Amino acid sequence: MKTLSRLGVLLRLTAVLLLLDASAARGDDETSPPQFTAGTAKAVISPDEPLTLVMGGKPTGKDHDIYARVLVLNDGQQRLAIVTYDLNCLDVATPILRKRCRDELGIDAAHLILLATHNHAAPIQIVPENFKYGRKLADQIFGLIQEAISKERGPARVLVGSGQGYFVQSYGHAPTDYEIQVLKVMVDDKTAAVLFNHPTHPLQSSQTRIDVGHPGYAVDAIEQALPGALALYADACGGNQFPDRGIIMSGTKEQVQELGDELAAATLKIAEGNLLDVTGPIRSKLEVISLPLADPLPREEAQKLAQDVPMNIGYVPYPHPDRGTNWIRALMKHYDEGIPFPKRTTDRVCTDDGFLIREYETPREFPCKYEEVIVARIGPMAFVAMQGEVCAPIGMRIKDQIRRVGLPMMVFAYMGEHNLYIPTRELVRLDAYQAKVIRTQYASPVGWAPEVEDEMVRGVLTQVRSMFEDIPKTKTLGLDEVQ
């Protein structure tokens, strides 16, 4: 800690130099780079037919269309495409979009940031009967990215700020993260886009009707307040956090609208306040962080569990009633056939229907392996996007360390393919719902090791550090403190 304190002044000076670099990138000197531009697009993605929803069952109607939205930033040499969608996760469309954007638009997977609002009142993407919709989504979103590129205008500026939204609560003996982060894009001194997040599950008024949850109503309110601007919401690290009203995620229509308006008001206050201009060169990197898994249950305990479980049905997809025992069938299969148990997440790949398996029957160019993390750099800003439902204490630790060295940032979860929870040490100790999901929903024969929290934090901070080589590496970002 003393060493970190002695480095504090140096690191803050480094951050100032980064801001000066961003100023130069905006054209404040005689050798300014190409003009920074931005483009936006949005479209309705509501299904034309009744499809299985996230909470199971078919929709009985629609209260609000669901949307996909795109913000493209272009520094003159590199593009960053940020996509949000009113879904719980994207899944099937993810590898399709990565391939098409790379091959047809020159946007590689690291520069394509796919972010969910975590909406539960929408079609789920891991039901085989919904795969056709997922492939259609890939086409729709690809077209939106093309549209946003065609609408790029400049000069554009990127500004960031943050504030608090004290209307969430945490679960699992954890502190609560209230932070709202905002990125505002200005084109010709007019607001072109506002991207914001909050670490929470959405509040939903129905589990049987298509809707957008309270973040979707916040988006509506912001677009009404800023005519001509595109509002985009994506979830932060809220895997163990929920709105402070209703029952967990369920509230009345009035409560959902009220909470949406409250989130919009807090976001607009930040967006209209004193923001930091981070306009500058764009870089981005996608890496897979290998996370630790626990040892398997002893065979004797596994056999006891298997006594009351149908063992001859294989892996069954959601919403099959025996989905939650897939992991027991996987556990016994490993014992009976002598299959080595996975020790880390990268020992398995994740199928479209959500199973963690040893390998695909047909190899994929973009396999889904946990834990994917994209870290983009916009001028002096760190833009972090993590796969899965990352729990709030993990996000808080990452943000705290980045904040200590004076870097502006935005930190998101629910990126890309599949929504596996990334739990804290305490949630693993409790074997809470967030810790069980790797078994009950993803058919892993083993659960999480307690070290998953620390290794997740260390992996993300290491990736952030690699994107900011101009910050001294010794003791940078508190990596020495992550055991």
Image (cartoon, grey):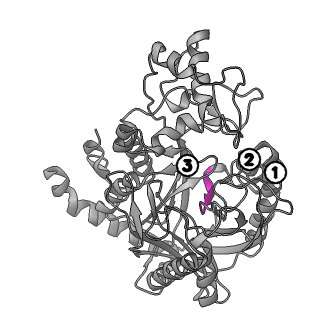
Cα separation, mark 2 vs mark 3, equals 14 Å
As shown in the figure, which amino acid type bears the numbered disc 1?
Arg
Q: Which residue is mark 3?
A: 387
Q: Which residue is mark 1?
A: 135
Cα separation, mark 1 vs mark 2, equals 7 Å
Label 1: which secondary element: helix
Residue 104 sits above or below residue 379 on the image: above
In which quarter of the view is residue 77 placed?
Answer: bottom right
Q: Which residue is mark 2?
A: 92
| Callout 1 crowding tier (Cα within 10 Å): few <14, some 14–19, many ≥20 | some
Report if residue 194 is visible in the image. Answer: no
Q: Which residues are magenta?
A: 110-118
Residue 172 sits above or below residue 447 on the image: below
As shown in the figure, which amino acid type bears the numbered disc 2?
Val
Mark 3 or mark 2, which is nearer the start of the sequence? Answer: 2
Q: Residue furthest right?
A: 48
Q: Position of residue 262 (x, y in %)?
A: 49, 81
Mark 3 or mark 1, which is nearer the start of the sequence? Answer: 1
Residue plotted at (39% across, 72% down): 20
Q: Position of residue 254 (x, y in %)?
A: 57, 80
Residue plotted at (75% across, 76% down): 151
